[in-house]
Structures are given as structure tokens and as C-alpha cells.
Image: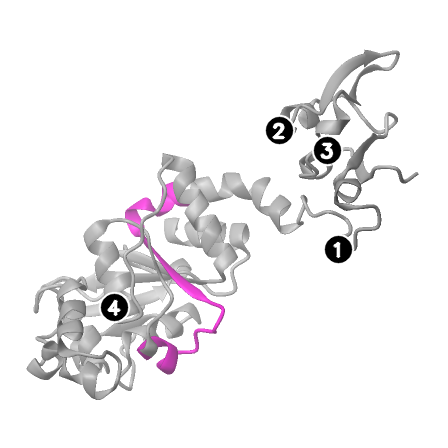
Amino acid sequence: MQNKMLAEAMRKALTLRWSPVAVRLLRPGEAVPEGVVEPADRIRHCQSITAARRGNCLYIPPRKHACPDGAGIMGLITMSPKLRSGDLYLLFKKLPTIECARKMIASRPEFAPGSYTATVLAPLEKATFEPDVVIMTLLPEQAMWLCCASTYGSGDRQVFHTSGYNSTCADLTVQVMKSQQMNISFGCYGARASSDVEDAEVYVSIPYGQLPTIVASLEKLAAKSIPEARRRLYMPPVIDSTAHTGGAAASQRVEVVIDANRCNGCGICEAFCPEYVLELAETADGEKARVAAGDKCCACYTCVGQCPQQAIQLRPAGRG
């Protein structure tokens, strides 16, 4: 039930196209969860994420992993000497020297062979198991809000450990399981070639234990910050003309206009204004906003965007 609620909350807050994908690496001796199916054909880990976000619930033992590199990185099998050596990266023209290839291999996160016996994946809302990580396929703007949600609860900025090599296996699964920190991936050349991840999409992986906190923060952001940003609240009404008709100084000056009939004296504009242009003052109709220092306006449009009564406008100085 919690998985379904978490998935629905993220879908609603971020307007997701794809379901978040629950991923678990089965430990030796662990039973196969209910409701998952072994695919008829061999499949790569990146392909299984695509299949799961489309609604499939999968159990993938080593015999059904099509990418031996990924299976080795996740500790399902012993990686072959040919893959371990780095020679194939030179053969496929993916890296320039054997030293470079070996450095990349040595620095990527991996699990020891035999650490795990299979991968299981499902859309989070359908997962009958507790995931190790939850992997999401997102647009960059959606990924940004996940970063904001992570910072919202802690104040910490994110530090990502990623590469264009071995993305879904190393960067999204092993790295996140080991570090217990959210990570981002742009995919790797293998994932981009063998799955349907689109050019403008990125991956974000979250440790399952942190998901409830991040979702709670995301819901708070979705109450105001997300819809405001998506409405482009701070965008000037006309930004497609750069012609200066009265000189640079004249073109940059603006006049702050307040509709006193609309203003309800809430004080939001005064609180938000970074240059103290606006203030509240007593009038015959109660407190209203007024322009206290119009020449200081930096035209950030925050007051225009935040005013709940749409009582404030900015217009070029000198225009009626």
C-alpha cells in the first residue's frame, strides 16, 4: 500500500509520464517476490527498467541478463577477463587507451560476484517487495524538483557520481545502494542504444529508505512552488523585443503600478521585494500597498507574479 501511495504522490506532484521503477537485487536464499515474471528472452538491465516503467513486473536471474557487463557490475556473475581487462572499450572505440579504460573500470561502483542472485523490477505502484532503489525516467525540470525536494528536508546540496559508462547498472543501482544517496544519470551509450529513453530524458535513482521523506517534501513544493514556476510567474509580459528606443537607461526603467481596488493589503509584495520598493500604508479603505521607492525597482517581476490579487503591473517608465 505504501508503494502505491508513494508512486501516486510523485506522479501527481511531478506530472510523470512514466511510473517510478522499484528495483531490488535478491540476496542469496531470498525468495522470489509474488507477482513477478521471468521474461521469455534475455534482457539488459536498462531494457528491464524500460519494461517496468511501462507496467511489467519482472524477475531476471543471471541466465536472462543479456548484458554480461551489467550483470557482473551488480554482482550476479563473475565478469569475464575480457570485460574486466578494458580491451573491449578500445576495440569499440569507446575510450582512447587501455590506461584510461582500466581507470574507469577501477573507479566504477560494483558488487562482488555472488553478492546477489537476480534482479526484480516493477512499477512502484505494483511492487510487492521492498525496493533497494527507485529509478525514475524524467525530464530535466522534473529532476530539478527532486533535487529541490532532497534539499528541502536537509538543506544539503547534491553531489552526483555519474558517467556515460555503465549507467543503469553502476550509477543508478550499485552506486545508490552503496552510498544511500540520490544519484543522477544521463544514460550510457549502451542504454541509449538499446532502450527507448528519449534524448531529452534523464534518470534519477533514490534509495528507497529516503523516498517517504523526499515525497513529503515534494508534496509541499507542489502546493505552491512547482505550479508557480511552471506558470513562468516572473516572466516579463514582452521579452521578444530588444530594440532601445530611448537609450539603454530609458529602456531599463520601469514604473510600478498598483491597482488599489484589487489590493487587499496582504503584504506579500512588501515581503518579497528585494529592493524595498513597496510598503504597506494605511488608507481610508485599510492597509494597501504603495510604491515607496520606485526608482529602485530592478524589474524582477516577483511582486507581479506573487500578488494573489493580480493588483501589480510593471510598465516602461514614461508610458501611460
For discs 3 and 2, the disc positioned in front in the rendered view: 2
Q: Can the viewer see residue 61?
A: no
Per the image, the residue denoted by label 3 is: 307
Residue 147: % across, % down: 42, 48
Distance between the alpha carbons at the discs numbered 3 and 1: 27 Å
Specify which label sits upstream in the sequence, 1 or 4. 4
Per the image, the residue denoted by label 4 is: 169
Q: Is residue 108 left or right of residue 287?
A: left
For discs 3 and 1, the disc positioned in front in the rendered view: 1
Q: Residues within 10 Å of mark 1 (few under 14, many from 20)?
A: few
Residue type highlighted by circle 1: Thr
- Nearest to the observer: residue 310 or residue 117: 310
Residue type highlighted by circle 4: Cys
Distance between the alpha carbons at the discs numbered 1 and 4: 48 Å
Specify which label sits upstream in the sequence, 3 or 1. 1
Specify which label sits upstream in the sequence, 3 or 2. 2
SS category of the residue bearing label 4: helix
Q: Is residue 206 magenta?
A: yes
Specify which label sits upstream in the sequence, 4 or 2. 4
Q: Which residues are magenta?
A: 190-215
User: Which residue is painted at 39% across and 43% down in the image?
Assistant: 150
Specify which label sits upstream in the sequence, 1 or 2. 1
User: Which residue is painted at 70% across and 38% down in the image?
Assistant: 299
Residue type highlighted by circle 3: Cys
SS category of the residue bearing label 3: loop
Disc 3 + disc 1, Cβ < 8 Å: no
Residue type highlighted by circle 2: Pro
Per the image, the residue denoted by label 1 is: 242
User: Which residue is painted at 86% across and 30% down in the image?
Assistant: 259
Distance between the alpha carbons at the discs numbered 1 and 2: 25 Å
Q: Which mark is residue 274?
A: 2
SS category of the residue bearing label 2: loop
